[in-house]
Structure formats: C-alpha cells, structure tokens
Image (cartoon, rainbow, N blue to C red):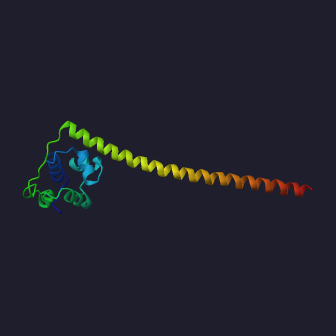
Amino acid sequence: MNNLTSTDFGERLKTLIFKMGKNQSSFASSVGVSHTAIGKIVKGETQPRFSLIDSILKAYPEVSRDWLLEGTGEMFINKPTITPTTPEAYLQDYLKRLEERFEKLSEQLTVKDRQIDRLMDLLGKLDDVIEEARIVALWKESQARA
C-alpha cells in the first residue's frame, strides 16, 4: 500500500461506485462511513483508512483487492449482477434508510426521555433536601435568638 496515492485510489473508488450503480451516499452507508469521508477520498483529499478498505472488501466480496489497492487486474473477481438503479428504486432505498434512521432516532429519544425523567426526579428530591435544610437553618436561627 506504499504506492497508494490518494488520487489514484479516489479514481478507482469513484469508478467502483459508478459500476456498482450507487451514489457516494448509498455506497458510504453500505460500508459504514459518512458520505463526506467518501467524497474526500474520491477527490483525493484524504487517503482511505485500512478499516474502510476492509469494509469495502467485506461488503463487496466480488471486488478485487489488487485492483482496489493497486489498480492491477480486473475490478471484479466475478462479474457482479448489478441491477440498474431506477429513480423509483433509488427513492425506495432512500425511504428505507430514512425509516431506519427515524426508528433509531425514536429509540434514542425514548432513552433520553427516561434520562430526563430520572433527572427531574433527582431534582425534585434535591429541592426537598434544600427545603429541609432551610427549615433546619431557620429553626437553628430561631433557637439561637431565644
């Protein structure tokens, strides 16, 4: 990987994304990184991390490791059967991802609501303790005057 330049890898990645019938965002989702990270690599601004290369090869086992890393040989070990992405299929895929994100956010909100409820209970108890402390302070003050 010493001969790997950002620009060369970025061009190969751009070609791979196109050949897989994806856009940068859907490809990024499929390998578990942000579309921004993929965009920077495609533009040659950054080099890929080994974890990304590993994720690509795991998500797309038909991609040749040698081609991806060095640009040698064929892109695919076995030619993939890629169905062309239609606007409807793209929108269905996008909608599915949005629904998944919404579900995750909904679960996170439920957790946060429980945390807020626990904090509110603690604040209520703290208010009770503060009120008791005031009463004790007033009582001690009145005892000291008497």
Give x and y (percent) for residue 134: 77, 53
Q: Residue at x 38, y 44 (%)?
A: 102
Q: Which picture quadrant has residue 136?
A: bottom right
Is residue 45 at all visible to an observer of this figure?
no
Give x and y (percent) for residue 101: 35, 46
Q: Residue at x 70, y 53 (%)?
A: 128
Is residue 58 at all visible to an observer of this figure?
yes
Give x and y (percent) for residue 97: 30, 45
Give x and y (percent) for residue 11: 16, 49
> In which quadrant of the rendered image does the C terminus lie?
bottom right
Q: Residue at x 21, y 60 (%)?
A: 58
Query: Quick one: which residue is furthest to the left in this view?
Result: 73
Out of 80 and 35, give the one closest to the viewer: 80
Q: Residue at x 51, y 49 (%)?
A: 113
Query: Quick one: which residue is furthest to the top in this view?
Result: 87
Side (left or right) of 12 relative to 118:
left
Query: Quick one: which residue is furthest to the bottom in this view?
Result: 2
> In which quadrant of the rendered image does the N terminus lie?
bottom left
Out of 52 and 112, give the one closest to the viewer: 112
Out of 82 and 36, give the one closest to the viewer: 82
Side (left or right) of 15 relative to 104:
left
